[in-house]
Amino acid sequence: MEHNNQGTLKNITSIRFKDKGKVYSFDATDIVLKEGDMAVVDTESGLAMGVVSSGIRVLPYDKLPHNLQKIVRRATDEDLKSHEENLKTNREALDFCMARVRERNLSMKLVNVEALFDKSKLVFYFTAENRVDFRELVKDLVQKYKTKIELRQIWVRSEARIYGGIGMCGRELCCSSFLNNFAPVSIKMAKEQNMLLNPDKISGLCGRLMCCLAFEHETYARAKKNMPKCGRSVITPEGKGKVVRQNILEETIVVDLGDGKEVEVSVHELQRKDRNRKPAGKNQG
């Protein structure tokens, strides 16, 4: 019998509800599950079905995630059939709602539809630039599907995750392939990496700053701490000059020595020269 103390061990597994969605931890109890299995779980919104994204792992009670919910059962044939019916409803509801949006000339973009596992509610995800009065649209949907309807506005990053695509790097979008959460991204990160602040070069398909700008930000920020800033005067083996460029990955700087002459110097060489420089002594009386 388990006790709620630090010595308690629980079987934990991870569940993903959407193909590219966030991964959540659940108490697996004594149910045997492996990666790729479908499972019915208890959530704050009721029962839901998702795919097991990792095998069982054991954690002590003091390391458990907050508000840990339980796995109800490994999905049965009946559960899988119900899930397929929900997916069919999602597709039909998407087409129906898009037609109603066009007919009512609403300034919104429908992105996705999701039926709850027990069919108690249909959730319609959309994006919009401004506030939308969709009360009449909700009436249309309730009349059609005879269930609870929720219209939920999402932001453009979530839209890009749902649709997917290929980034300028030639690879599948990070948000739709492996990212579980959206980390904050700022223009400062692009500046730290000495990138041209051209919106076409630093923006993703969603029109916002690329998520990958955050991946190496700490590495760039740490490296720049040991580099003299542009405009600063430094002394190189070939003379004194001003820093005009930083090559962060190479850990070098380009110094303008005057008369159009530039030299590239290793930051480590500058640091060694600084360490070897003797402090000026006081005049002897």
Image: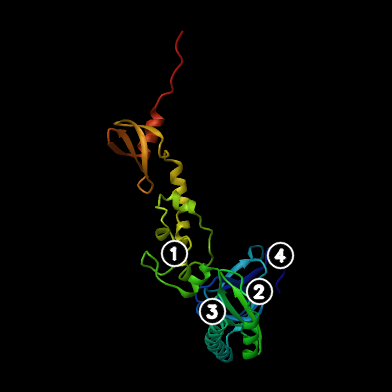
Q: Which quadrant holds the N terminus?
A: bottom right
| C-alpha gap between disc 4 and disc 1 | 46 Å
Residue receiving disc 4: 5
Secondary-structure class at tag 4: loop
Dot 2 surroundings within 10 Å: few (below 14), some, or many (20 or more)?
some
Q: How far, Cα to Cα, is label 4 from label 2?
A: 18 Å
Q: Give the mark nearer the N terminus: 1 vs 3.
A: 3
Q: Amino acid at mark 1?
A: Gly
What residue is shown with label 1?
204
Mark 3 vs mark 4: which is more N-terminal? Answer: 4
Residue 118 visible, this angle: no
Rounded to the nearest whole Å, what is the CA distance between mark 2 and mark 3? 26 Å
10 Å crowding of disc 1: few (<14), some (14-19), many (20+): some
| Mark seen at residue 69 | 2
Quadrant assignment, res 69:
bottom right
Counting residues from the N terminus, which is met first, the one under dot 4 or under dot 2? 4
Disc 1 element: loop
Amino acid at circle 3: Asn
